[in-house]
Amino acid sequence: MSEHESPQDRPSVAQADASARSPFRPQHVDPVPLTSVAALLGLPAEAVGAVHVTGVSLDSRSVEPGDLYVAVPGTGRHGASFAAQAVEKGAAAILTDEAGARILALDGALSDAAVLVVDDVRAAVGPVSAFVYRSQSAPSEEDARAPMMLLGVTGTNGKTTTTYFANALLAALGHRTGLIGTIEIVAGREAIPSRLTTPESTDVHALLALMRERGLTAASMEVSSHAIEYRRVDGVRYDTVGFTNLTQDHLDLHLTMDDYFAAKARLFAPDRAARGVVVVDDEWGRRLAREAAIPVLTLSLAANPAEGADWTLASTERSGLGTAFELRGPDGQALRLHTGLPGAFNVANAALAALMVHSAGVPLDEIQRAGEVADPFSVEVPGRMQLVGTQPAAVVDFAHNPDALDRALEAVRPPGEGRLVIVFGATGQRDQGKRPIMGAVAVRGADVVVITDDDPHDEDAAAIRADVLAGARAENDALGLGRVIEEVAPRAAAIRRAVELATAQDVILVAGRGHEVFQEVKGIDLELDDRVELRAALEARGFRTVGAEQIESTTDD
């Protein structure tokens, strides 16, 4: 999953998939006395006995011997209902709330289990996981390694690309790097497909400990508003956090834009980060820069830069599909960089990544040299402006909200006589208000609009399409645009139809799902990769394609 997540995706032990057992754990964890965990939580230690724990788990089925099993309230049943299974698998102790303790008291088989009871068990998970795994503890006298640099990126759009850019830059600077995000989790050389933008806090801390154990020196992490709201990053402290932008999305969870902003802003607090970098080209960024409780650098990429911004965009020049650009900072400082990915938003993503690395302590001259030698901001990001064909140019992108769709259309608009053909839909059981807006954005930016399904989830797919179509047709009529608008389902057929409608001079944009390889319909995951479908449709018409080996290599993401 990704920031397509919803409140229903909040995991409970009862709903957790059996395959959810964490692959992130370090090989070795020094046993931690349960008395020390109790002291951390402000609880009396006398009742827990001589128990030690070596891990933390929220899922009874992924418990390993020595774990502290955390029994949280779920959307269906309380995790305490599964405590017996956890103990049978080797859990050394249980952490729960008052409701969970009452459930445990009814099970006589658990009468000898060591139990810690707190008022808010979810609030305890992150700090306890950090404590048990020592995920960000200062090195011991025996461990001469420096602490691992950790960067976190939040915002509506651009998180994935910015973390990939930061990761590539850090690698070019000589770091051994890790990555935690929507597409994959990378711990050194090992890549692990990701289902959530930010994993559960137990996995986050175990993963950070694993990265340290493997000798990684820097890592970049996407931090979604869901992760902050659901406490997945509690107990994590970043060297630098970055903010991309805030546009309408996820109002099914946050209800209002002010609530959505407040969730993001909580990342910019002293207990979560030392410093920040904020793009101030929207009012939300400017507000965050004013209200952040940590020191922040501000960045403006607008033609008329935000007043008082620390860093601004001095110049841009097209370079192939990408852009060469120069940033100007305080006291005449400058960075001259390049991104091979199209679109002004990728200039913003690259600039933010560079300044986050600088904010974390890397001198500008080192960033400049790495940018010149390694071109780190041209790294391919699966499903983000990913080129699949050249004649017509055919691109797959993750844009799944109005602002991202608008930016993607602007980035791929063909010069001259070529037309822009778009295929997209809207996700079910999500913010319904954005559906007609996305339809309107599509007809303003594209010449041919093919509306289809995204992930309907449990909602009626035709009803979702109708909402998008209503916005598209209303805008088309109001502005007299004369766009071609078609409704085609299923999605693979819509992609084929877009290719049928295109000529070699056109551009095809397939938007909304990016790197995703399954489409969820009524609880069933159907295999569907937009990149594979688009490539097949292009080849069937004899059009030129690129990157087949890259597309095929990412179909297991």
Image (cartoon, rainbow, N blue to C red):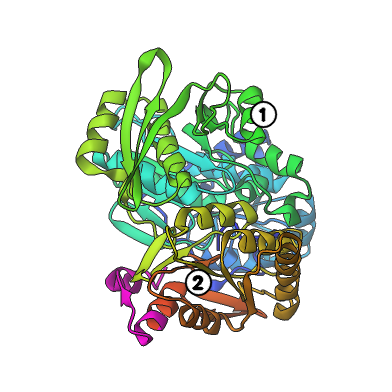
- How far across and how far down the image is residue 267, in percent? 59, 35
In the figure, residue 358 lies in which quadrant?
Answer: top left
Q: Which residue is mark 1?
A: 287
Q: Secondary structure at mark 1?
A: helix
Q: Is residue 364 visible?
A: yes
- How far across and how far down the image is residue 80, in percent? 70, 61
Q: Relative to 172, is 355 on the left or the right?
A: right
Q: Which residues are magenta?
A: 537-557
Q: Which residue is mark 2?
A: 19
Q: How many marks?
A: 2
Q: Is residue 456 above or below residue 335?
A: below
Identified by mark 2, the residue type is Ser
Q: Is residue 190 above or below residue 448?
A: above
Identified by mark 1, the residue type is Arg
Neighbours of disc 2 within 10 Å: few (<14), some (14-19), many (20+): few
Q: Relative to 304, is 266 on the left or the right?
A: right
Q: Which corner quadrant holds the N terminus?
A: bottom right
